[in-house]
Image (spheres, rainbow, N blue to C red):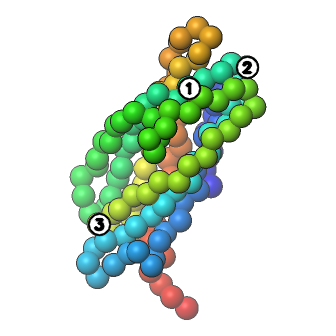
């Protein structure tokens, strides 16, 4: 698990290689990642947008942007957290992701760019 904190907003990411959904011989590797966002700041925030940078050893880097996360724009009061699971397909068994969550402080409308820490996606293709 990797964790980063920006202005009191903590983002933790845990990655799992999904061997049962992957086909290495067809250059198809599936990863899921669980993100937990914890509001340790003194203000209420809302996650409005996201931007991901996806790096795959077999391809050029990709940028993916959109509203919210998995169709939601969660509002987090002080002490609250929000978790979700999403996924990424790679053509190689080696990659990484990092990103930014664009949030807004609801009391004054100020924007915050919250760092999503870089995390590795490494396929465990060796079996004992």
Q: Is residue 73 above or below residue 7?
A: below
Q: Which residue is at a point 47% across and 54% down the rendered structure image?
A: 86
At 43% from the left and 50% from the top, the residue drawn is 97
Q: Can residue 59 be seen in this view?
A: yes
Q: Name the residue under label 1.
A: 46
Q: In this view, does 124 lie above or below 75?
A: below
Residue 91 x/y as whole percent: 29, 66
Q: Quadrant of residue 21?
A: bottom left
- Give x and y (percent) for residue 20: 45, 79
Task: State the CA–CA distance, disc 3 to disc 1.
Answer: 34 Å
Q: Where is residue 71 in the image (x, y as percent from the top left)?
A: 44, 41
| Residue nearest the observer in this picture, 49 or 4 | 49
Up-down: is 112 above or below 11?
above
User: Which residue sits furthest bottom?
Assistant: 128
Q: Is mark 2 on a helix, strand or loop?
A: loop
Q: Mark 3 points at which residue?
A: 91
Q: Are marks 1 and 2 in contact (CB under 8 Å)?
A: no
Tag 1's secondary structure?
strand
In front: 125, or 75? 75
Tell me the number on the disc at residue 42: 2
């Amino acid at each position: 698990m990797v964790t980063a904190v920006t202005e009191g907003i903590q983002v933790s990411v845990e990655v799992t290689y999904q061997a049962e959904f992957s086909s290495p011989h067809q250059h198809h590797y599936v990863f899921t990642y669980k993100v937990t966002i914890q509001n340790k700041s003194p203000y209420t925030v809302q996650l409005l947008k996201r931007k991901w940078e996806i790096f795959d050893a077999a391809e050029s880097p990709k940028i993916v942007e959109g509203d919210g996360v998995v169709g939601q724009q969660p509002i987090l009061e002080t002490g609250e957290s929000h978790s979700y699971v999403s996924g990424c397909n790679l053509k190689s068994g080696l990659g990484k992701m990092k990103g930014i969550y664009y949030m807004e402080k609801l009391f004054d409308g100020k924007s915050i760019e919250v760092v999503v820490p870089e995390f590795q996606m490494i396929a465990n293709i060796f079996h004992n």
